[in-house]
Image (cartoon, rainbow, N blue to C red):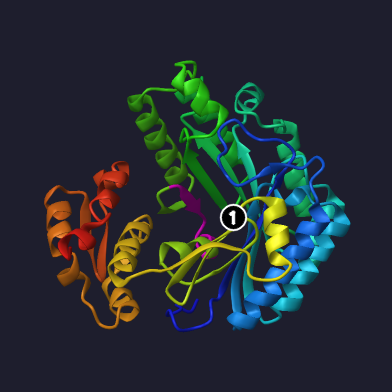
Amino acid sequence: MNTATHTDAPRAIYVHIPFCTNKCFYCDFNSYVLKDQPVMDYLRALDREMEYTVQQTPPGVIDTIFVGGGTPTVLKNDEMEYFLQSLRRHFPNWAEDIEFTMEANPGTTDADKLAIMKAGGVNRVSFGVQAFQNELLTGIGRIHNTDDVYRSLENARKVGLNNLSIDLMFGLPNQTLDMLSYSVDRALELDLPHYSIYSLKVEENTLFHTLFQKNQLPLPDEESELNMYLLLMDKMKQAGYEQYEISNFAKPGYGSRHNMTYWRNEDYYGLGAGAHGYVHGKRHINIKGVNPYNDAAATRLPRLDASEIDRDEAMEDYMMVGLRMLEGVSKERFARQFNGEQLDDVFRVQLDKLLKNDLLQPTEDGYRLSEKGLLFGNDVFGEFVGSLVQEHA
């Protein structure tokens, strides 16, 4: 896959569909319960944003598309068709081996809808499964059950969608090590190309945050959570999956190419309410609410905010996101992205400290997290937050 520089047209697109059947108890994403939402108005607004976007930054060849949410698969069949046609019309030039991912909830994808997705170019589906115990799913506000998971995967395979991924979570309220072990075993029996396994984060403006503040959220303690992470890493490794990023595991060749765009700090279009984009060294965030977004997109790009990322911040970002990947950061890619700057010179102080504390290890062309660093990733990333800004203040 080509590595974009910040002067090329972005080769990746993220599209946000903000509708859900219900709001999960841990979710702080920009999402809205579907009932009574102006869905078709939103898809027309999205079509206009695409039009304005390609006028301003004409696209080249698109390597990856990722449709997230919300739950994109709550779109009705005719809405889904309209949306996929919009995308194809405004961004017509797709790489032959494009990776086109759509997030889905088990229970929102019948065979007809999956067939429409496939016909529209989708070739990878990521299902939000989270756990294989119905009581845990109910406890986090999910509306599907484990039967829905098996049925959804079977439907996807029936229509020829075989590049499938599922998300699992650990550190959930009332979850034990045995429960996680059971979930990972059930997930591995499915023999999928890709798994994402995240720890629960209690975010503000969620039901879980309210319960946490009242001391009513029975979370596993830190040691249990660490043991959960060690267990899942071990199980995935034993099953032949490569841990290519802190929370992501894949069979060889099946890592998420779209997410690599973020982790390599490369450019991407961000479309839809509340979406973030990064184009030619500028980051933007779109207006979040559905109706305000629809109104804004009638006449202009629906931006909430846009800012030039200065060089220091871009370099810090490069380290923080790049070290999430198990391959680590590349000196050669750093020099290419930052006009010949040398990674070792720019971050000498931070690198020396992290190497000394055995949190990083050298690679042939850069640095990666050590085994210890993998467990304390946030400490590593924290070393780079604002580090150059402080130095140059």
| 104 up-or-down from 269: above or below | above
Overall secondary structure of the magenta stretch? loop
Q: Quadrant of residue 337?
A: bottom left
Could you tell me residue 373's position as x and y percent? 26, 47
Tell me the amino acid under the disc marked 1: Gly
Q: In this view of the protein, can residue 95 be seen by the observer?
A: no
Left or right, 360 with respect to 253, comes to left
Q: Residue at x 75, y 50 (%)?
A: 73
Q: Quadrant of residue 146?
A: top right
Q: Residue at x 25, y 82 (%)?
A: 340
- Give the extent of the magenta segment: 247-257
Could you tell me residue 246's position as x and y percent? 40, 49
Could you tell me residue 46's position as x and y percent? 72, 64
| 93 up-or-down from 38: above or below | below
Q: Residues within 10 Å of mark 1 (few under 14, many from 20)?
A: many
| 192 up-or-down from 184: above or below | below
Could you tell me residue 126's position as x and y percent? 64, 51
Which residue in the structure is indicated by mark 1?
Answer: 274
Q: In this view of the protein, can residue 197 be seen by the observer?
A: yes
Front position in the image: 274 or 359: 274
Q: Residue at x 63, y 69 (%)?
A: 301
Badge 1 marks a residue whose secondary structure is loop
Q: Residue at x 27, y 49 (%)?
A: 382
Left or right, 76 with respect to 313, comes to right
Q: Quadrant of the C terminus?
A: bottom left
251 falls in the magenta region = yes
